[in-house]
Every structure is written in structure tokens, then in C-alpha cells.
Image (cartoon, helix red, strand yellow):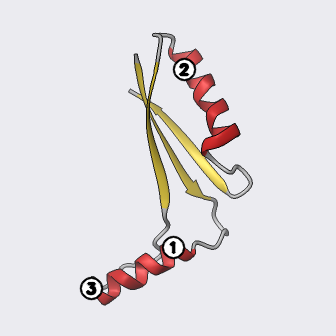
Amino acid sequence: MIKARVTVTLKNGVLDPQGKAIEGALGALGFEGVGQVRQGKVFDLEVEGSDKAKAEADLKAMCEKLLANTVIENYTISIA
């Protein structure tokens, strides 16, 4: 079993209203000096097999087809 983490974030220049809302909420809670909050998502997956190259190729295909909207999002894959 291969364990992997996929992190998906908005590309630079794409508006992030949820990040702005989090930034405002942190300020309202008294956390001063926090700015440029960007929100994303993390997927932890287990892929059967022991071939890391195949697992990485499969994970990339998963990102391209489902996990990330590649028009507005970037993703990174980390295999443990």
C-alpha cells in the first residue's frame, strides 16, 4: 500500500472569497497581522501496489479528472 497526500490550492490571481472570510474571522477573534489567507483542500489516499511511479501517474490522473479543477487550481502530490 502506498500512502499519498494531494494538496489542492487556488492558482494565484483567482479570487478566494472563503479565504477572505477566514481572514476577517481571524481578525475578529483578535489574531492581528494575519493577511492573504488562501483556502485549499487536502486528500489523503492509499493506493494499492508498491510501484511509486505508477501510483504517482494514477494520482496525477485522479487530480486531472476529479480532485482538482485545473483551470483555477494547482495541486501537489506527496508520496510517503
Residue pictured at 59% horizontal, 16% vertical: 54
Q: Tag 2: Cα neighbours inside 10 Å, few (<14), some, or many (≥20)? A: many
Q: Amino acid at mark 1?
A: Gln
Residue pictured at 46% horizontal, 80% vertical: 21
Q: Amino acid at mark 2?
A: Ala
Q: Residue furthest right?
A: 71
Q: CA distance from mark 2 to mark 1?
A: 32 Å
Which is nearer the N-term, disc 2 or disc 1?
1
- Check whether the beta carbons of the residues at disc 2 and disc 3 lie within 8 A of each other: no
Q: Quadrant of residue 34?
A: bottom left
Q: Tag 1: Cα neighbours inside 10 Å, few (<14), some, or many (≥20)? A: few
Q: Which mark is residue 29?
A: 3
Q: Which mark is residue 3?
A: none
**Count of numbered circles on the image:** 3
Which is nearer the N-term, disc 3 or disc 1?
1
Q: Amino acid at mark 3?
A: Leu
Q: Is residue 40 left or right of residue 10?
A: left
- Give the x, y percent position of residue 38: 49, 67
Q: Is residue 3 above or below residue 52?
A: below
Q: Which mark is residue 18?
A: 1
Q: Quadrant of residue 75?
A: top right
Q: CA distance from mark 3 to mark 1?
A: 16 Å
Q: CA distance from mark 2 to mark 3?
A: 42 Å
Which is nearer the N-term, disc 2 or disc 3?
3
Which residue lies under the disc numbered 2?
55
Residue pictured at 58% horizontal, 72% vertical: 16
Image quadrant occupied by the C terminus: top left
- Give the x, y percent position of residue 17: 56, 76
Q: Residue furthest left?
A: 30
Label 3, secondary structure: give it. loop
